[in-house]
Image (tube, grey):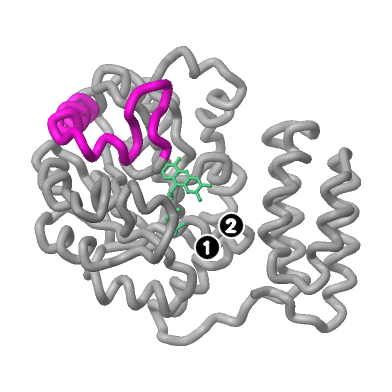
Amino acid sequence: MIQIGPYKLKNRLILAPMAGVTDRPFRLLCRRMGAGMAVSEMVIADPKFWKTTKSLLRLNHKGEPDPRSVQIAGGEPEMLAMAARMNQEQGAQIIDINMGCPAKKVCNRAAGSALLKDESLVNSILKAVVEAVDIPVTLKIRTGWDTDNKNAITIARMAEDSGIKALAIHGRTRTCGYGGEAEYDTIAAVKQSISIPVFANGDIDSPEKAQFVLNHTQADGLLIGRAAQGRPWIFREIDHFLNTGTHLKAPNAAEVGEILLSHITELHHFYGDHMGTRIARKHVGWYLKSHKDGNEFRATFNKIESAQQQLANITEYFKRLSNGEDIAA
Ligand SMILES: Cc1cc2nc3c(=O)[nH]c(=O)nc-3n(C[C@H](O)[C@H](O)[C@H](O)COP(=O)(O)O)c2cc1C
């Protein structure tokens, strides 16, 4: 069982932080669909951004089950420490530091995985954030900043020595962006080098791949990002496979329709109808990516401005599909 500070996770599967995706409605949905934890979108460390609508929505954790992990992003130790404290006050139970996203800069300073190049700055950040809060701090990194400079082991040891309680590693370097395939050898080497929980990340998109990555890296858990977009039930499918070695039946059209309707309804409530209808469009696109008639439906759907009409169109679409068809990919 994975333990992060006082929190025991119910399984080994975590929704990876994704800016613009892992908002509260999606986190709640993924938890309901079997994720053991769901990391929030990053909160920019600079306080001048905290009052924007976007940031205020990111600070909202109402109704979220334990443990609530909030990611912070920035490049200055003091500012990150302040952001960690503020998020603790707002209900975060775990603070996750972003050294994993490929964005070169946050607020004109090196941030995300670009920090990996400056090990002494990494050290100062880790120490400042751990000292600033009473709750566990975790770290998310890539394998290094480029393929000739994979310093994940050095950073991992530094993290453990600084009091970081768990480490997630995406099996790509910063310069890889999202190109090529994630590699898991470096993650396996990191797992051998430290004793805090290690979460493997990158391209895990099926129960078999999840099993392979766990076997190969001996990681304690897995972070799943893009594969959960439009497919939040992937968590229960992977969990079932890891526990039993058998496949859970894919959800049928009626169930996918119910899941999507509840997701879109929550987006409307959370963001309000105007913003909610816009955000709903990209999620609907992901859910219907593998559908034969998905593109046609989306072309019409993306022009709808009313929340009620969006729900009516989704209901109608899935009613048609439910006539005996299994559509979930
Ligand atoms: C749209 C999008 C937004 C992301 N935002 C963040 C972020 O805010 N913080 C972060 O650490 N990683 C971020 N990531 C990286 C993911 O957490 C994850 O490491 C990466 O997508 C690889 O995992 P996957 O192959 O399962 O998607 C983002 C990825 C995507 C696709």
Asked whether 265 or 192 is in front, the reply is: 192
The amino acid marked with disc number 1 is: Ala
Quadrant position of residue 298: bottom right
The amino acid marked with disc number 2 is: Gln
Question: Residue 178: where, in percent of width, then height?
Answer: 44, 55
Question: Disc 1 versus disc 2: distance between alpha carbons?
Answer: 6 Å
Question: Does mark 1 have its CB less than 8 Å from ligand 1?
Answer: yes
User: What residue span does the magenta drawing correspond to?
Assistant: 103-130
Give the residue number, with chain letter if any, for mark 1: 227
Residue 4 at least partly seen: no
The residue positioned 39% from the left and 66% from the top of the image is 181
Asked whether 182 or 163 is in front, the reply is: 182
- Image check: 62 left or right of 190? right
The residue positioned 45% from the left and 76% from the top of the image is 207
- Queried whether the magenta region covers residue 259, the answer comes back as no
**Helix, strand, or loop for circle 2?**
loop
Give the residue number, with chain letter if any, for mark 2: 229
Quadrant position of residue 222: bottom left
Quadrant position of residue 12: bottom left
1 and 2 marks in contact (CB < 8 Å): yes
Toward the front, the furthest residue is 148
